[in-house]
Image (tube, rainbow, N blue to C red):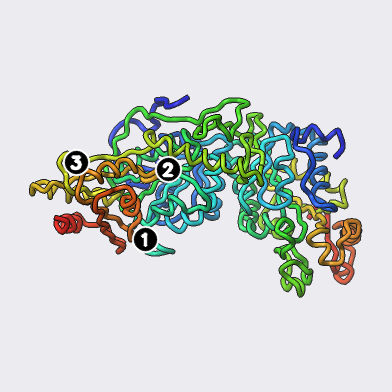
Amino acid sequence: MVRELEKYLRPGIGITTYCPGCGEAILMGLILRAIDELQLNMDDMLFVSGIGCAAWIPSPYFNADTLHTLHGRTIVFATGAKLVNPKLKVMVISGDGDLADIGGNHLIHGARRNIDLTVICANNMNYGMTGGQVCSTTPLGALTMTTHQGNPFCPFDLCQLVKAAGAAYVARYAVTQPFAMIRGIKKALQTEGFAFVEAVTPCPVQFGRRNELGRPADMLKDLMAKCVMREKAEKLSPEELKDKIITGEL
Amino acid sequence: MGLQKVKSILPAGSYYFSGDEAVAEGAIAARCGYCAGYPITPATETLERLSIRFGETGAVFMQMEDEIASICSCIGASWAGAKALTVTSGPGFSLMQEGIGYAVFTETPVVIVDAQRTGPSTGQATRVGSGDIMQAKWGSHGDYLIIALSPWSVQELYDQTIIAFNLAERFRVPVLLMAEEATAHLRERVQVSGEVELFSREKKAGAPPFGTRENDGVPPMPAFGEGEKLLVTGSTHDEHGLRRITHPDIHEKLVTRLHNKILHHGQEIIQYENYYLEDATVVVVCYGFTARSSLFAVERMREEGKQIGMIRLKTLWPFANDVIRDIGSRVKKILVPEMNLGQVVGEVMKYASCEVVPYNQVNGEIIHPKTITEQLRRLG
């Protein structure tokens, strides 16, 4: 991470625990850049995270109030804190397994209530921390630790889910689209109400290696090839959109 | 800080409340700032009343999507600086257990009222039981001690709700108010005094929020937004809250202190009432609604000249070990009537050297005084 962002990091913590090629340290940098560009005061911020790799982005690295909660319950912990102290700028950072699988009910209810929270969902399409098991965002047919013959189930489109539930702002970007992602996170932070950013992030160690994308560079290239901005996607046929990830404000 | 007298929000006087309503008014008296819950019989009426009353006092009421969300949002609210409450019954209490463990480990003050009904599972939702007593002690995984109170009247539901908040703030621990359907739905007169004694959590800027020099201390508790850059985690942590997940000494030190801070302060926590113990040869050890029937039975037996006494446990956890050890060494027999298949009786057996006889009833009805009288006659 560049020196100018160091002031946002908790002193004395040292290196991150992320695997080689993980996109979540990139995401950590992008979140801090968005905060930096908006000149937000970290003393006014509360970061709430759950269980999993992405939950370690703010806790302990961010030099602010952090609440590292139970698996799946980030949004309700954040809801209680926000309602008691509305002056807090509350950002939830967690993974797809945490927010959409075990915490799926709280996710849709949070969006429905439109409580003023910024939710960053790092989607690496599997359970990284526990060894690469299938989850609700794993693509159909993908190989995982628990789907050796390919995932038989369709994944959630998290953005459509949260949008349908009533969120005020919904966007999806991959960590391979850093500038767009920063813009999206800034917009989410400036939104009053429930703002949701799905951050697609590579997990070469657990997901990639089982799907012929074990080298970090291969997984990044694959993501770059798959991501299509919404405006462009609207002009493409369903055939052309097969296996693509539509990004942008949704 | 310590205990401070403040003016009661409700004007002093006599009120006619249901038990559930008394809990709501007790929470308001204790300056509860946040209540979240999910409708469940027989606890719903507390939520109903708070949804109206909090509108008047400015506190936050939230009906959540389930009991997991309720307890977790209470913990978030507590760290944001509010006194927090959730109320539920058996099925919801089961769902809350992971959150209760999180509150224990993060030393979060929160009050949980369990208006007990029959179980297991859905059981008989409108009928009374006391089947959640051991679940209150160890329902969440891992080793911990907790505080659980047992009210026997609507007045005590009001009083103990305030005490529960005070203990939660004093010891930074979840406090469980183990109500029962019979008292939750009972209507009785409640005396509200003009002043209430309240404890508010200690604050000390810059002090470690998760450790003390003593092995049984309660650290100060800052709130979010006070510039303390708090690290709150359910993982094992050092005194600053930093996750330390492979250090044997840090885990042992933390779990032991959380245990000791309750265990070593029993005198401050444990409350009980003695009745006719001076010459008693047989003693009823009881709690909750069953203590009402027991007292009635004991007094009838006294009228007949029988040397029967009674101890009513107002605090169930931590257990009144010394009280039971003492009485067990002085009497011939102890009767423990319970609306479950034997939960507190096991604890009594652990500490009493005399004969301990259980009486158990799980038919969804209160134990009738006549039944207790019969049991006492059988004991001689």
Q: Chain of mark 1?
A: B
Q: Are marks 3 and 1 in contact (CB under 8 Å)?
A: no
| Crowd rating for badge 1 (residues with CA inside 10 Å; few <14, some 14–19, many 20+) | many
SS for callout 2? strand
Question: Which chain's residue wears label 2?
Answer: B
Q: Nearer the viewer, residue A213 or B256?
A: B256
Where is mark 3, residue-wise?
B277
Q: Nearer the viewer, residue B74 or A116?
A: B74
| Image spot of residue B56 (x, y percent) | 46, 37
Disc 3 to disc 2, how far (Cα)? 26 Å
Residue receiving disc 2 = B147
Q: Position of residue B37 (x, y in %)?
A: 49, 50
Could you say which is closer to the camera, residue B238 or residue B295? B238
Instruction: Answer above or below: position of A151 versus B76.
Output: below
Q: Quadrant of residue B151?
A: top left
User: Label for residue B118?
Assistant: 1
Look at the numbered disc 3 and give the secondary structure of its residue: loop
Mark 3 or 1, nearer chain start: 1
Quarter occupied by residue B8:
top left
Looking at the rendered structure, the kind of residue marked 1 is Thr
Q: Which percent across, then down, holds residue B73?
A: 56, 46
> Of callouts 1 and 2, which one flags the residue occurring earlier in the amino acid sequence?
1
Observer-side mark, 3 or 1, equals: 3
Kind of element beneath mark 1: loop
Q: Chain of mark 3?
A: B
Q: What residue lies at 44% left-to-right and 56% top-to-bottom?
A: B40
* Marks 1 and 2, how far apart at CA: 22 Å
Q: Return the x and y of residue A154 as percentages of the image width and height.
A: 73, 69
**In this rendering, would B207 be left or right of B16?**
right
Return the residue nearer the eye: A83 or B251.
B251
| Residue B148 in sight | yes
